[in-house]
Structures are given as C-alpha cells and as structure tokens.
Image (cartoon, helix red, strand yellow):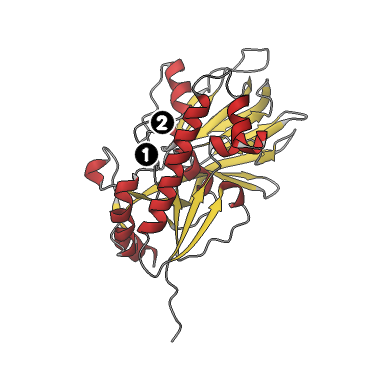
C-alpha cells in the first residue's frame, strides 16, 4: 500500500524594507545613516521587520506536529515545485497572495497578516494569534475555502499569463497604446493609456481607483466569476473611439488585437517584469481561467458578502 505524505507547509515571504535597505547600504548602521534625511523611515522599517520575523516564528511554531516545512522567498516562486499535498502560507501583505496565485493549483493558501493594525489583510486574513486555530482546521479538512477567480491571457501563439487581481494591456511606459478591443458584440479601435481586465478580487484595488475617478460602479463580489474591463484615458483621435471604456463580462471572453509596433505588453497583478510581448498584429483572448485560488478564510459570517465552504466539501467536489 502506498504511503501518504504528510502535508508540507510552504511559507512564502518577501524581503522586508529593512532587509532591502541593508542589502543596498551594506550594514544596518549604514542604512540608518543613509536614511536620516527621511525622519521616521528607518524606525518604521525596523518595526515592520520585527513584526514580520515574529509572524514567521509564530507560523513555524504553530504548524501541526508531523508536517514537513519549506520556507521560500517571493523570488523563488517561478522555480519552486509545489506538490499537491502542500499548504501554502504567505506571511505579509495581500500582494504576496496575488504573486502566489499563478503558481499554485488547488493547494489551500492560508495568508497571515503580520501587522493587522496597519494592513487591511483582504487576502491575508489571519493574524498571528489566529493562525494556530486556522491551520488546525486545514489539517482537519474543515477550513473555510473561498474560490477566487483567476483571469487568463492567451496569445494567438500559445503563450499564457495568469493573474488574481487584474491583467494590464498597453504600452510598457504607459504612454499611448493602440489596439482593437472587442467585448461581446461591441468592438472599438482605441488609443489610450492601456486597459485592465479585472476580477472580483481585484475590484477593491487598482480598479476601484479607476472606477471612482470615472464615477461608475463595478458591482463585482470577491467570489464573482465575472470580469470587468476598464479602459484608461481613451483619447478621441480620428479613427479611434471612446465609447467602449467600461464593460462587464458575464461569460465568454475579451479579445484585443495590438496595433503597437514596439513596447506593447501584458502583465498581471502589477508585476511589470513578468510580461508577454504584445506587438503589432498579436491577438490576445482574456477570460476566466480554468482554475481558481483556494483561499483559506475566516468563517463566512465574519467576511461580509462572501460565501465560503469547508475544505472537506472542497475536497469532495474535487475528487
């Protein structure tokens, strides 16, 4: 009879501001000296660094007995081999969960917020104090799971890119981008600062700023399988339209054809270094991906408007 591997906790972090300062300036004292012109910055960096290390230590100490463990940095995600039995534990801000989403497939992701007094924690929902109870529920297959939609870009040459919050399509310098946009039976040639295709998770981030400036309501719940399209600063030049600047995609897909000679890109979740080239004549299809992020969450009654289900039920459905 084949043995069943114990779960492996994969703890994911990113360098703290203090660690980056020390990397840049060589020593802690030199970092302090070089930042003295920015009152309070060094002290704030130290505070955040201490909270981060306390949180990681608490996670390590709170893991169930017998679990295997690995600790990696965000920069390792692209080359790390996630296994089906992994429980992924990002410790940090919400953006770290978005970084992880494109690399996991069905593994539960349990986010820990090291500084809940100052960080909202929409995706890293558990404090250090809550962690041990939360991971115990995961171990017992009784954790609440939120299915978060992932958006996928698929180029006509087969290249693909995934994102949890949004995909940006435009020029890498954010200057004028030219393309042809089709949503459902509507089509328009546009010159703009680019556009984003956003999920329900991303509706509370960059998309919210664009929608607020435009005075429109996205009406996307966090668990929604809808997508929204928001065009940035469409310019009414000859041959270019400005009517198709906000749209909701209930099903189906968005098609965009590039009219940019050089500099056209597609990137996800604000990570500009991980991009697809989008030059003249290239066509991209953007739609809901065939997989989602399994976010471990607080019970549904504690997260307004989001319907959760237990990991046990999720596993039963997945079999």
Residues 21 and 118: in front is 21
Please say if the residues under marks 2 and 1 sit with CB atoms less than 8 Å apart: yes
Asked whether, in this view, residue 165 is left or right of residue 154, the answer is left
Report helix, strand or loop for mark 1.
Answer: loop
- Please determine whether, in this image, residue 259 is positioned above or below residue 144: above
Gap in angstroms between the C-alphas marked 2 and 1? 9 Å
Secondary structure beneath dot 2 equals helix
Q: In the picture, which quadrant includes the C terminus?
A: bottom left
* Residue at (61% x, 47% y) in the render: 75
Q: Residue at x 22, y 43 (%)?
A: 301
Q: Which mark is residue 298?
A: none
Residue 269 placement, left or right of 177: left
Percent across and percent down for residue 249 are: 46, 36
Which residue is drawn at the image coordinates 71% and 48% (left, top)?
157
Q: Residues within 10 Å of mark 2 (few under 14, many from 20)?
A: some
**Residue 6 vertical position relative to residue 290 in the rendered view, above or below:** below
């Amino acid at each position: 009879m084949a043995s069943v591997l114990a779960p492996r906790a994969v703890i994911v972090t990113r360098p703290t501001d203090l660690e980056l300062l020390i990397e840049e300036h060589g020593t802690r004292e030199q970092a302090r000296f070089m930042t003295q012109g920015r009152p309070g910055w060094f002290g704030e960096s130290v505070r955040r660094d201490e909270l981060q290390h306390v949180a990681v230590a608490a996670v390590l100490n709170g893991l169930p007995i017998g679990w295997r463990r690995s600790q990696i940095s965000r920069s390792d995600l692209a080359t790390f081999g996630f296994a089906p039995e992994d429980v992924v534990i990002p410790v940090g801000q919400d953006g770290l969960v978005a970084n992880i989403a494109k690399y996991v497939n069905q593994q539960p992701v349990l986010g820990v917020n090291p500084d809940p007094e100052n960080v909202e924690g929409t995706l890293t929902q558990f404090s250090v104090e809550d962690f041990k109870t939360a991971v115990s529920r995961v171990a017992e297959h009784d954790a609440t799971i939120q299915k978060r939609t992932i958006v996928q870009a698929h180029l006509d040459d087969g290249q693909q890119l995934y994102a949890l919050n949004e995909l940006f399509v435009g020029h890498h310098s954010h200057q004028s981008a030219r393309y042809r946009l089709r949503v459902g039976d509507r089509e328009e040639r546009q010159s703009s600062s680019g556009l984003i295709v956003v999920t329900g998770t991303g509706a509370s981030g960059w998309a919210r700023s664009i929608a607020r400036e435009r005075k429109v309501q996205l009406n996307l719940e966090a668990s929604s399988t809808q997508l929204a399209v928001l065009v940035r600063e469409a310019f009414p030049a000859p041959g270019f339209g400005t009517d198709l600047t906000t749209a909701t995609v209930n099903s189906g897909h968005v098609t965009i054809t590039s009219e940019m000679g050089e500099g056209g890109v597609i990137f996800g979740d604000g990570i500009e270094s991980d991009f697809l080239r989008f030059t003249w004549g290239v066509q991209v299809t953007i739609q809901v991906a065939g997989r989602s992020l399994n976010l471990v969450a607080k019970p549904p009654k504690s997260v307004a408007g989001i319907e959760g289900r237990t990991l046990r039920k999720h596993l039963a459905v997945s079999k």
